[in-house]
Image (spheres, helix red, strand yellow):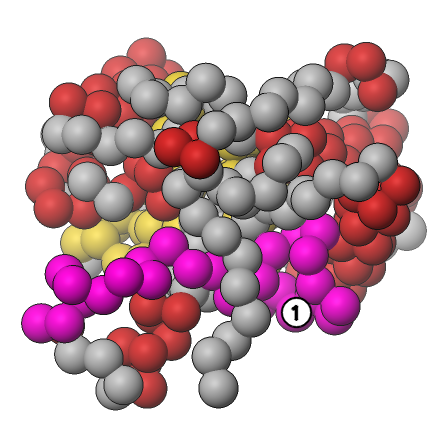
Amino acid sequence: MAVVAACTDKGAKRSVNQDACCIQVAQTSFGEIIMAVVCDGVGGLSAGELASATVAYRFAQWFNEELPTLLAGMKVGLPLDFDIVQTVWGIMLANLNETIQVHARANKLTMGTTFTGMLFCGGRYLVAHVGDCRAYCLGSRGMRQITEDQTLLAKKLREGALTPQEVATYNKKHVILQSVGTEGILRPVYYTGTYTATDLFVLCCDGAYRKAENQGIDTFFANVDLSSEDELRKACQSVVAYDISHGEKDNLTVIAVCADKQEHLVQSPPEDLPTLVEADEEDLPTMVEADEEDLPTMVEGDES
């Protein structure tokens, strides 16, 4: 069985938590399926928390209401077709990108959110990635970062236009290159891989990894009993507490997932997936005006 935990906090300085996250777990005829999503509303935009909540809610809705139909059309005994899931997720993100922009224009708002989502099933995972949240894998070979930051800083480092020694004084560290709700054409990046029952996956927003990375995110999960949800939750909370105590001003979200690699197929019909309680617009976060100190990042176009 999967063991999952999460912690999200508005932090010590922010008046609003612009992060949103969700974790879904279901037993199906394809085995156990887990989905984890973290979204970080883009600072500098007036309704980032509404954008992040909208995207997280839509993916939870897909898992509970549309994934069963997808599974019903697949042959039991074969692996879950991640190519189909990737196509569906790409369409969803494109639609969300357009929907958020339409809502923003109609209400004279600016809205955007980063997105990192993972799906686990039968020893394989799929990641869809937009922006600068991160997905890590902590396994027997140590910790590795699965996703690449879609930031101006990371781009310049990859291109050799900036040296590691220049990072400390670089004044555009928080500029992201794309987010859901701000792009003419959204271009998510996808990653796939395999996992074992001893692998731990950590998803987090930039506010959660900026300070913790100095300590080493893997150290917070060292010697944690991966079968204990309580221990995983405490480890997530320890990351957040460390960040805040070391001066992090942003919102913070950490998700931990230990997905059991199930070779055994659970013979229960896809219709048995849990349903999600419908929520209307009043259930979404309200839009709160923030002052300049509450706005840690800005979406900008690429530099020529």
- Residue 146, image x, y percentages: 38, 60
Decide if residue 255 is in sight here: no
- Residue 161, image x, y percentages: 27, 85
Which residue is painted at 14% across and 72% down in the image?
166
For mark 1, does the 10 Å Cα neighbourhood hold few (<14), some (14 to 19), or many (20 or more) residues?
A: some
Quarter where residue 299 is shown: bottom right
Residue at which label 1 appears: 187
Decide if residue 48 is in sight here: yes
The chief SS type of the magenta part is: loop
As rendered, which of 158 and 266 lies closer to the eye? 158
What element does badge 1 sit on?
loop
> Is residue 178 on the magenta stretch?
yes
As rendered, which of 223 and 172 lies closer to the eye? 172
Which residue is painted at 17% across and 54% down in the image?
142
Which residue is painted at 42% across and 64% down in the image?
151
User: Which region is colored magenta?
Assistant: 165-189
- Residue 39, image x, y percentages: 55, 40
Which residue is painted at 70% across and 63% down in the image?
183
> Is residue 292 on the magenta stretch?
no
Using residue 54 as the reference point, say whether residue 207 is left or right of it.
left
Using residue 163 as the reference point, say whether residue 93 is left or right of it.
right
Using residue 235 as the reference point, say whether residue 114 is left or right of it.
right
Using residue 170 as the reference point, say whether residue 64 is left or right of it.
right
Q: Which amino acid does label 1 sit on?
A: Arg
Tell me if residue 16 comes above or below residue 95 in the rendering.
above
